[in-house]
Image (spheres, rainbow, N blue to C red):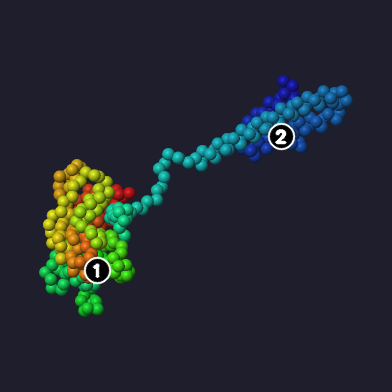
Amino acid sequence: MSDLDSIVSSAQAAFAAASTPADLENAKALFLGKAGQLTELMKGMAALSNDEKKTRGAAINVTKQAVEAALTARRQALADAELEKQLKAEALDVSLPGRQRGQGGLHPIALAWERVEAIFNSMGFDVADGPEIENDWFNFTSLNNPPNHPARSMQDTFYVDMNDEQGLPYCLRTHTSPMQTRYAVAHAKKHAAAAANGTMPEIRVIAPGRTYRVDSDATHSPMFHQFEGLWIGENVNFKDLKVTFLNFCKAFFETDDLTLRFRPSYFPFTEPSAEIDIAFSSGPLAGRWLEVAGSGQVHPSVVRNMGLDPEKYIGFAFGSGIDRLAMLRYGVNDLRLFFENDVRFLSQFQ
Ligand code: PHE
């Protein structure tokens, strides 16, 4: 092996032995540095003749290029190895499950409530809201239920320790029915002139909201939700009530597979009065009559308390439990589950 060939092979060996970029730079100095082997050879050329310089110079250049090529290759290899190491260290395990932020959602009662509003809205009903602390007039008396009337004991009332202008205690409304007179009075006042010449727009409204009674078991909670329905006009009858409520039930339960029946009942504010039962002809509840609402033709005294002439205006009202409808729709058998706020229960409705 010539001296030049041995320089190339010892440079290759030295570069291969360098395991870091710093080691490699030190190894480079041994060959290409100021006092490196190749530099020394170049210096030695000064003593040669012109012809010898040519051949020797060319040979040294070839050697130098080979050493530089070996150096570049090793630099690249070290850089690749370094990058590889870094990638390994910072590798992400994309198969790990992500950390999730719990997603919120609407409560099943709120979902049912929204369905009720959307369905009645689509049937041309307005949606009204009213106070949960109600005075005696709207909760009872305006609904044909005067003080000391035995029908008042149909509902166990929470009273508030404060009297209204008539000296009667306020109560937590026991039903949404006070919204019948509240809404109708406002409507009759607003359209008084039109009513006088017979062009008053019909009252068509639902009023969903919280209601309260002293009651607590698997199907009763002291706070529960109802929605009141009221449709008053010049010629509104039981057939309209039946069609309206049946269409509502079909939309709410998303099935045509149900029948509706009226069962005679009593409420002071309707005459005649009826409970509304429905029965599905298939599914888990098939064949059972399920009570879903109280209803009836609005009593003439109540129409009068609305500020309307009962000789002219007639209509119907109904009151239904939103919680009960939600229980039937979602197959929940204990009302109290809705109010315990256990996310394992609530998240099933999202
Ligand atoms: N308010 C009655 C109840 O809560 C239901 C009802 C409303 C009945 C409207 C007739 C008409 O039991």
* Residue 161: image location, x then y, percent: 22, 75
Q: Is residue 194 left or right of residue 328?
A: right
Three-letter code for the amino acid on which mark 2 is drawn: Leu
10 Å neighbourhood of mark 2: few (<14), some, or many (≥20)? some
Left or right side of 43 for 327? left
Q: Which circle marks residue 174 in the picture? A: none
Q: Which residue is mark 1?
A: 308
| Residue 92 position in % (x across, y down) | 48, 41
| Depicted 198 relative to depicted 32: above or below | below
Q: Is residue 222 something one can see in this rendering?
A: no
Instruction: Name the residue beneath numbered marker 2.
Output: 30
Question: Is the residue 51 above or below the residue 171 in the image?
Answer: above
The image quadrant of residue 67 is top right
- Which of label 2 and label 1 is nearer to you? 1
Q: Earlier in the sequence, mark 2 or mark 1?
A: 2
Q: Secondary structure at mark 1?
A: loop
Between the C-alphas of marks 2 and 1, the distance is 112 Å
Q: Residue at x 20, y 66 (%)?
A: 311
Q: Quadrant of residue 109?
A: bottom left
The residue depicted at 64 percent of the width and 34 percent of the height is: 75
